[in-house]
Image (spheres, rainbow, N blue to C red):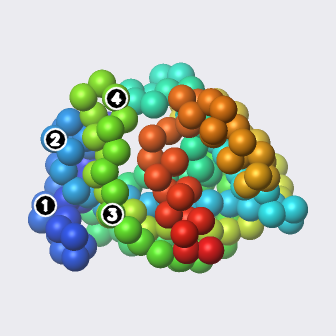
Amino acid sequence: MEEFVVLVNPEDEVLGLMEKQQAHINGLLHRAFSVFLFNSKGEMLLQKRASGKYHSPNQWTNAVCSHPREDETYIDGAKRRLQEELGIEAELSEKFNFIYKADVGGGLWEHELDYVFTGDYEADFHLNQDEVEEVRFISIEDLDKEMAENPENFTAWFKIILEEYKHHF
């Protein structure tokens, strides 16, 4: 099934739709969301992207990052992807939004108006292996150390979004 992203201007006014991969080739600004999940110890959930993903396979990233569909709110899209990728439900809170552009390799760009949500989660996962290889919780301190030592193991956008997240909190 062909997936489309919602193209927007910096004020989040809709400009139209474009097939997802074409938008990433053209580097056009589109709607996105990112979810950070934490356990009761304050550790962040990371997911390792599946090996079959068309960009950034086998790299670690935040719990969920994706795009809302046409006529879908950011939070509804985030909850949908929690279910589709991790097989879970969680209460989410919108924290902030910002625009970034990241080279993800292979001539592809993420240029996103990204709405960032957080939530808590402690139970089991039911991973969609087409999307997610594995998940793990990690302390922010250990994550910072791991990212400094092996930055190539993490998605380009996660590095940007994590810094923005730290700036807000």
Secondary-structure class at tag 1: strand
At label 1, the amino acid type is: Gly
Cα separation between marks 3 and 4? 19 Å
Q: Name the residue under label 1.
A: 16
Of the image marks 4 and 1, the number of the one nearer the N terminus: 1
Q: Mark 3 points at which residue?
A: 99
Cα separation between marks 2 and 4? 13 Å
Q: Position of residue 3 (x, y in %)?
A: 29, 44
Secondary-structure class at tag 3: strand
Mark 1 or 3, which is nearer the eye? 3
Residue, x 16% and y 41% (percent of image)?
Answer: 26
Mark 1 or 2, which is nearer the eye? 2
Q: Quadrant of the C terminus?
A: bottom right
- Asked if residue 21 can be seen in this view, the reply is no
At label 4, the amino acid type is: Gly
Residue sitting farthest toward the left: 15
Cα separation between marks 2 and 3? 16 Å
Secondary-structure class at tag 2: helix
At label 3, the amino acid type is: Ile
Of the image marks 2 and 4, the number of the one nearer the N terminus: 2
Q: Quadrant of residue 120?
A: bottom right
Numbered tag placed on residue 105 in the rendering? 4
Residue, x 13% and y 60% (percent of image)?
Answer: 16
Q: Mark 2 points at which residue?
A: 26
Cα separation between marks 1 and 3? 18 Å
Numbered tag placed on residue 81 in the rendering? none
Q: Do the residues labelled 3 and 4 touch (CB within 8 Å)?
A: no
